[in-house]
Amino acid sequence: MFSGVMMNTWTAATIVAVIAGMTGFFAVLRGETFAAHAIPNGAFAGAAGAALLGINVIWGLAVFAVGGALGIGALGRKARHDVVTALTLVLMLGLGALFVSVNSQYAQQTYSLLFGEVFGVSRGEVLPIAGLGLAALAAIGLAFRPLMITSALPEVADARGVSTRKTGLYFLIVMALATSMTVPVVGALLMFSLMIGPAAAARSVTARPGAALALSIAIALASVWLSIALSYRTNWPLGFFVGITGAAFYLLGQAARAFERHRAS
Amino acid sequence: MHYLFEPGLLASGPVRTAFLIGAIVAITSGVIGVFTVTRGQSFAGHSLADIATTGGAGAFLVGLNQFWGFLAAGVAAAGLMEAIGVQRRRGRDVATGVVLGAALGAAALFLYLGTLRTATTGASFTILFGSIFVISPDTVPALVASGVVAVLAVAVLARVLLLTSLSPDLARARGVNVRLVGAVYLMALAVSVSLAAVAIGAVLSTALLIGPAATALRLTKSPLRAMATSAIIGLAVTWLGTVLAYDSYYWPPHGHGWPVSFFVVALVLIGYLLTYTRKPRRLAPRSPHEGAECSPA
């Protein structure tokens, strides 16, 4: 289970779990769950478009991720946020359908873009992921205070001169880039499961933001490690175990909270 | 006219079925979508489509009729979301996300087990995008029936639903069971969305649920007029999109057409963006922080 090839998987999955636990925490805190689903999911169209043009898929993913984030962030201020997110998502997927129909060879790759190929990660792929993880950590770390303030207490943020709008857009772009670039490795759907379940579980256990962030990353790590081990043993897809463990941790968190409340009263 | 309607369009059987099913789905989604947009449940609407397709994959695996798989998964997911959902909007989105995450995991398993049995490499693609041209006419009666049930449920509840959507507190004060109304509505949404997902794919299902309704709600504030406008817009974009997709067989690159979903999504977006050219009628200026969490329901 810890042979040479598998070590790449463990390393890549660990980095991805840290990215997901961190960005997921803020996504849940800020009520950006839908955007967290829409952007990596829609960015797959960018990969299909890049394949059509014959350039590296990373560029397609980056363009569509940033475009999606800007679309949601800019239009979302004028109209209902969830409506704009839904329309941005269907636009990206509609374009994806067009690209795939023109270059039909790409249809076969859809499965791996949605569900990932964590067990096929090569050493060459681990390094860019590590770089991306560090960049995401730095980007979130740099804006940690404004992010926390605008997420938890928007009114206080305004009084202190922190722009809620700019911080929101900044976070959307960071989340979009961090989650979309990992799509070829972990898949769009797995990334989403890993972002929401652990963060929601952490938030239901503790209300303190710092502790919840740490717990969110810890649960994401536990979830992904457990899933790799189970997937390795059973040969069933990793995405299945990540989805199930994420939901299970959330239920555990809810149960723990209910128990606390029961004891307190 | 000859340029828009290529010869032989209406003589083709699959095209006629596509028109019929497109109309049913567009009208159902248009009517129900008005409440989805008003209640801010776009995420749930989209997730139910994704989850329903998971059910379709599961039904395919055990050899059941796909439509019942779609419907069962959609309704079960709606029940789960309602059961763990908190009444606050953010909590509701998180509940939706958790259910969606688990369902996507199941989808990964079903697709994996499916590909073990049969060599269907393009299965995940078809499940995402569907194809309006390959629906078998046998499923039409079931599609019509579930569409009618969903629209009827919403029509009967329309007044109460509107009240609970706009002002839950007022509704509660009048003795309305807000939770129950929300649950019934979510079930109707699940039926409508599964119907749309099985007929036209998850992408178009979301496009037709949200796009026409959001456009209509920007044009009129009256709920009845919004429902009618939304259904008409949905019908128009679906039919026009189908015609364009049919025509595109004669466009470059030769030999195969452009997908229906692309045309419908493009038309939906053009319609929505056109409403921005109108000056919005607004009584009070909006506060700068009106975003996802603090806009009135």
Image: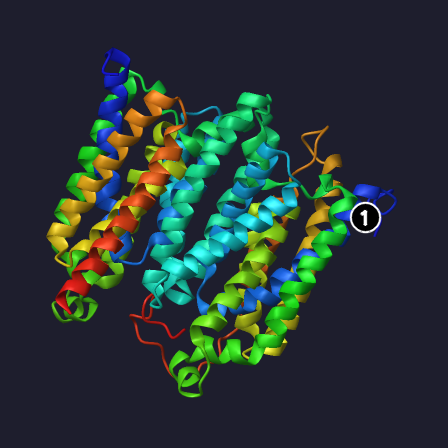
Q: In this view, does A56 lie to the left or right of B198?
A: left
Which percent across, then down, holds residue B295?
A: 36, 72
Q: Which residue is drawn at 64% across and 40% down?
A: B259
Q: In this view, does A85 lie to the left or right of B198?
A: left
x, y percent for residue A196: 31, 47
Q: Quadrant of the C terminus of chain B?
A: bottom left
Q: Where is residue A132 in the image (x, y as percent from the top left)?
A: 24, 32
Depicted B140 relative to depicted A105: above or below:
below
Q: Mark 1 lies on which chain?
A: B
The residue singled out by tag 1 in the image is B16
In this view, B246 is above or below B187: above
Task: Categorize mark 1 by other alpha carbons within 10 Å: few (<14), some (14-19), many (20+).
Answer: some
The residue lying toward the viewer, choosing from B131 and A96, is B131
- Using the rendered image of the protein, determine whether residue B20 is visible from the camera's viewpoint: yes
Residue placed farthest to the top in the image?
A: A4
Q: Could you tell me if residue A171 is visible in this image?
A: no
Res A237 → quadrant: top left
Q: Position of residue A49 (x, y in %)?
A: 49, 33
| Front residue (pair B250, A184) | A184
Helix, strand or loop at label 1? It is: helix
Coloured how?
A: rainbow
State the count of labels.
1
| Image quadrant in which you'd find residue A61 | top left
Residue A57 figure quarter: top left
Q: What residue type is labelled 1?
A: Arg
Picture residue at 18% right of the left edge, 66% below the top: A153
